[in-house]
Image (cartoon, rainbow, N blue to C red):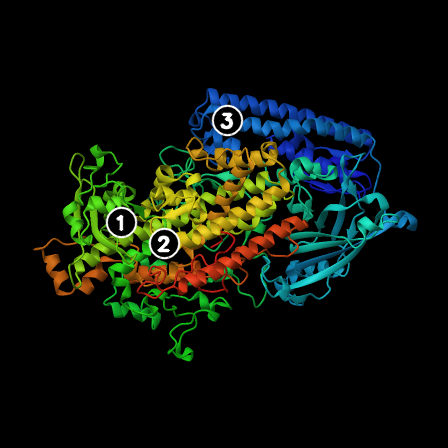
Amino acid sequence: MMEQAVLQGGLKTSNNLLVMLPSSKSLLVSQNSSSQLLLHQFLQLKGQQQNKKPAAATAATHVLQGSRKQISNRLHHEEQHHAAGRRMMRMSQMRTTETKSPSSSSTSSCRRFLSTPLQAFHSTTQSATTSTTILNLGREVVEDHQQQQQQQQQHLLQQLPQALPAEQLQVQDYIVLKTSLILSKKEFFELPHVPGGTPEQLFDCEDEFLGNKVSLQLISEDVDPTTGIGKLSHEMQIENWMESPSPSDTASGSSTGGGTYESRFDLEFKVKKEFGVPGAFIIRNHHRDEFFLKSVTIELEAAQGDEESNHNSTVHFICDSCIYNTKAYKSDRIFFSNKVYLPSDTPEGMVVLRELELINMQGDGTGERKEADRIYDYAFYNDLGDSDCHESMKRPVLGGSQELPYPRRLRTGRPPSTTDPENQESRVDSVFLNLYIPRDERHTQVRVKGVVSKEDAILAAGRKLLPALQSLYSTHEEFTSLNNVRDLYKSPDIIATPVSSSSLSSSSTETRSSEPDEDPENQPEGMTYPVPKIIAVDEKAWTLDVEFGREWLAGINPAVIQCLQEFPMISQLDPTVYGNPVSTITVDHIEPFLDGLTVEKAIAEKKLFFVDYHDGFLPYLNKINSSPTSHAYASRTVLFLTSDGTLRPVAIELTLPPPCPGDENIARVFTPPSQGKNWVWEIAKAHVLANDTGYHQLVSHWLRTHATVEPIVIATHRQLSPLHPLHQALVPHLKGTLDINAAARKALINAGGIIEKTFTPHQYAMQISSGAYKNDWRFDEQALPADLIKRGMAIPDANSKHGLKLTIEDYPYAMDGLELWAAITAWLHDHIEIFYADDQSVQTDTELQNWWTEIREVGHGDKKDAEGWPVLNSKPALVHTLSIIIWLASCQHAAVNFGQYDHSAFMPSHPTSTRRQIPEEGTPEYEELERDPETFYLSTISTATQASVIMTTTEALSTHGCNELFLGQRSSPLWTSDPKVLAVFTKFQEHIAEIEELIKSRNMDRTLKNRYGPIEFPYEFLYPSSVSGLTAKGVPNSTSI
Ligand SMILES: [Fe+2]
């Protein structure tokens, strides 16, 4: 009868009884059997992780009796299934790698959507050798714990209820652990208040009033020798659930945002004196709705005779997590305190929990992810196209091939598309529906009345963008004059429906307003654009060549310029396909502009520089230019470093690919006018800038920060326990990346998305990004010093600050960047010294080694055999590796992100696309150009409709949220319990503060001409802190926008 009830989905509850639901979720039914449950969850999840379907299926038909013998039998039975599952998995893997073509199997169509590291691996072209390596990694973890599991099963035979109900403890036997929880309840801001609600809502409210539906149970760091798990307290229910919350301004910086309404609940746990220090707790929510758990604090009462060690000590848990109904989870929600350990130093009571939590994060690689899931897994970029919508929306899969390699994204498990199930994942139905990411990765954990978050601002901007996006399909409104462009800041409704995020974010008006002479009463709400700084002081300075040159050193794409060391420049493309590889820029073109130097001399003195977009764009141009609305070139630009330290463009080469196979490519060289303004030169610069804008967005910004960091986020949560000191150090720098990347896949980089509709590369945009990953991306070269050296912008010099001598001393990005790079590496050095005694301890840190192997071989699996991956076998190698990650996620992203609006929101200065070729003299088009050059210029660059979309988008992307955390900041001063960790972090904060003062002083030094330039826009993109809003400065901890 009991079994039948379970099969029907019923839940039997009684003492000493563990019930399995058909969904294979296990539910605890005995107050005193948590250790049994934890062990069972551990085994069950481990089984699922290893694709042990037989065990899970069988479990659904069994009820575990609480008797020792039956539990033991059950666990033994499961382990037999597990062992069989492992054997089956290995056999399957052998078949896959040795004999089976993925496409030859009846299950092959699903394989592209199976994205565990192992499954993803087998659907790609990766080698069998690597397969074995990854499998071994998995087996090591499994086999390490097989012995432990057997011991735990033996322990269960002897298990007694070790957490006596509090009322059964004698006063002399126990101590009291005063515990407080801070949380935000969903009902406060979302639950409709009855009367008048639906029956379901009434039920919710009744739940809320009755309370006693949320419980807490503490777990000691000290092991219970009878279970092998930490000692368990009794389970306590939270009472007075309907207690009124109060506003808390102290939440500033937390993921809940400032001004959050919070509730505090106090509990008193009575535990035996020998309980030990709580290292974790289990929280169970039996309400229908989730709530946001911010923190838990436990006051330790001194045990008799042990007052010195325990007196007044407090254990803190920084949770910042949504807690859903227990049925939403396959395992209990466990939180660890802010005390961290290397795996080998883990307190015995935490060992199993440490791995259980990692298994929870890894999942089993199957199924579609649900809202409450907390699983981090990998997938290819197979969700950008939408062939179900239209054949023209089909896009190739990025990642998993030599042709189109790419970093992995977060797996969502969405079903395959209908029309191309082999290759494409289906799209979400609406741009406003969320793609799966673990709930705690979202920008805002809760929505609170009166607080507009970054997420809300982006969503609102997206809604306002829709009319403009729709018009892109039907209209191409032109700017009629530069004054017409400037009107966007006065009467924006001439184009579409632009929106200012400053009107969406309650705080952004602090830092930027719309036209000051406009009467707000006469302005439609949310209809004005802030004046971008590029024209704020001088409306025409952006046209000057010196500003064109300066922006390669202090603009939003400052890491593409290279020192010219060979002349002429030579392409790496196949000459049989793309024609003459030798640049047509000659000595005669550029020597007139070198202030008397020969080219040879200028190269020797390191005064010639170049920006090369030839190879990145040329392969796609015939396809791109087949559209009647496109005409783009592949550009090379040569610049000369003048005696005053500024850069002067001296030649631009614009190339078109051979029109037919076997033809020669078509290259034209343009040089600056000897005096006055020349519109042909200005249009040539516009073509370069359109290349640059596309490369900036697709490579410098998206690929080098957002996309390459995503697999590191995934691996960190899969392989580094929250108890790991590097998890604690890294996670603040990985926050929000999955969220913004998912949003980008929905609306920015997808087929028909904003990038395709507004940037020159159109539907080939992401293939260009993939090409850059394939040809130019190496992990070690993402370190700022290595990148500068590679580009010839610095040389190693022991006598120079930071050990590098800059080729151009006044290079603001490099100057400020090296200060931050040094601060980050110094902090990480100090941090690592606390935990790692020697290089050996780095090598034997199993979680760390698994983490790094997974990043290289799975997350960046397409580049696993490339050069540039550090070997993580020493403390210096670890410091360097972590420095690169944090540099990319914080500083490098800030350098290319937060100036987007102020540099590119005036479209003529930074067009995103070009539509007309540069006319030859004697043609009707050339006469048109001479007759009305300004109109011709505007008809060459992006349309007004495209401009309004870009302005809206870049404004949202350049805006700091109201709860942004900047470099050197943490959400809570209690983020760690270790005074040594806090001390080195305080030192880091002081270092950051010194850098801010240094940047201020540099910006006051007018001999550094590249910091302001003629547009009078100081370089502050690497100034660490900022207020919220559109500030063009500030370095957030992570890539989250
Ligand atoms: Fe970004």
Side (left or right) of 165 relative to 427: right
Residue 596 is situated, as x and y percent measured from the top left of the image, at 18, 52
In the structure shown, which secondary structural element does the residue marked by tag 3 occupy? helix
Asked which secondary structure carries label 2, the reply is loop
Q: Determine whether, in the image, residue 802 is placed left or right of residue 1010.
A: right
Residue 686 is situated, as x and y percent measured from the top left of the image, at 25, 56
Residue 688 location (% of width, % of height)? 26, 52
Left or right for 1023, reference 194 = left
State the residue in front, 939 or 48: 939
- Above or below 54: residue 955: below
Indicate which label's residue lies in the foreground, 3 or 2. Answer: 2
Q: Earlier in the sequence, mark 3 or mark 2?
A: 3
Query: Does the closest atom of ligand 1 sit within 8 Å of the Cβ of label 3?
Result: no
Residue that carries the numbered disc 3 in the rendered image: 131
Q: CA distance from mark 1 to mark 3?
A: 49 Å
Kind of residue at badge 2: Tyr
Ligand 1 has an atom within 8 Å of the beta carbon of the residue at disc 1: no
Which residue sits at x=82%, y=53%? Answer: 301
For disc 1, the marked residue is 607
Q: Quadrant of residue 545?
A: bottom left
Residue at point 40%, 70% (across, down)? 527
Q: Number of callouts in the render?
A: 3
Res 210 quadrant in image: bottom right
Q: Which residue is mark 2?
A: 811
The mark nearer the N terminus, 2 or 1, is 1
How far, Cα to Cα, is label 2 from label 1?
Answer: 14 Å
Tell me if label 1 and label 3 are in contact, CB under 8 Å. no
